[in-house]
Image (cartoon, rainbow, N blue to C red):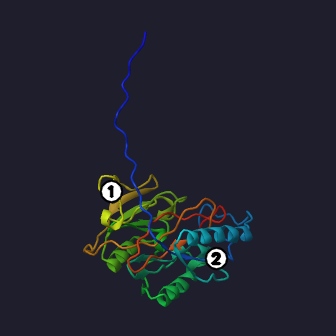
Amino acid sequence: MSVETTASTSETATPVRTAHHRHYLMCKPSHFTVNYSINPWMEPAKPTDTARAVEQWQKLHDLYLELGHEVELIEPLAGYPDMVYTANGGFLIDNRAYVPKFRFVERQGEAPAFADWFRAAGYDTVIPEEVNEGEGDFLLVGDVILAGTGFRSTGDSHREVGEVFGREVVSLNLVDPRFYHLDTAIAVLDPVQGTENGGPSARTSRTSPERSTTRAARSSKSASPTRSSCPTKTAPCSVSTPRATATTSSSRRGRRASRRSCASAATTRS
């Protein structure tokens, strides 16, 4: 006896993604180590291999250039091993840079260095009043900023970043200490809005900013300023590569970039 079954004819179309020229800011892990603990993953008792971190970082750096992207460097500072995580060094839209104000004293010396770099590079550099950790807790999705709080950046920084960029802000409360930065809990693959700008079409954009959350975050709208009417430009970007040093990009003057999460040169992240 045979049983006839009918297979479903509906198939999910795979969204087509378009490659974009990107502009990265990287910091060589010359001083990379783990000699303090400011998150559950940092264990100073476990050894790190700085030479290996530099080797991995160099491969990533060279790959970006090989793929035709632009890479700029910020000089690493001795005594600040986590400066390699440049995603935390600022949040950029168009040609404006909102620099960090780190929560932990171990990282606070990085902020002036990032501010100096952005000024020298010609960015409109904004010094914050509120504690924030840059792209670690701010992600651009279309014309909306997703903003994390709970462990590092304060809720007041969400108001401030909204005022700085004139964008709507969606606040996300991080609830798991293992995911202390928003970019450890969520990644934005295509922040560019509009097919004319190389972004996904409405048909393939199935996830709205309010739904782009993970179990590690809970969402609530913050009080937001008037939404900008200008075309979406670029968010800073860090690329996730397995066991590779974290980097950030700063796309300026109309260059568009995707936004992804950080990865570590070892097994830790600050």
The answer to which of 173 and 78 lies nearer the viewer is 78
Question: How far apart in space, not on screen, are marks 2 and 1 (Cα)?
Answer: 35 Å
The quarter of the picture where the C terminus appears is: bottom right
Asked whether the beta carbons under mark 2 and mark 1 sit within 8 Å of each other, the answer is no
Give SS at disc 2: loop
Q: Quadrant of residue 12?
A: top left
Give SS at disc 1: loop
Q: Is residue 84 visible?
A: yes
Q: Quadrant of residue 257?
A: bottom left
**Residue type, label 1:** Ser
**Residue type, label 2:** Lys
Q: Between disc 2 and disc 1, whose residue precedes?
A: 2
Q: Left or right: where does residue 230 sit relative to residue 77?
A: left
Q: Position of residue 180 (x, y in %)?
A: 51, 63
Q: Position of residue 112 (x, y in %)?
A: 53, 86
The quarter of the picture where the N terminus appears is: top left
Count residues near mark 1 (Cα–Cα under 10 Å), then give few for <14, some for 14-19, many for 20+.
Answer: few
Q: Quadrant of residue 217?
A: bottom left
Q: Residue furthest bottom?
A: 120
Residue at the spot of label 1: 208
Q: Position of residue 193 (x, y in %)?
A: 33, 65
Residue drawn at x 58%, y 61% as measured from the top left:
241
Residue drawn at x 47%, y 63% as measured from the top left:
182
Residue at the spot of label 2: 28
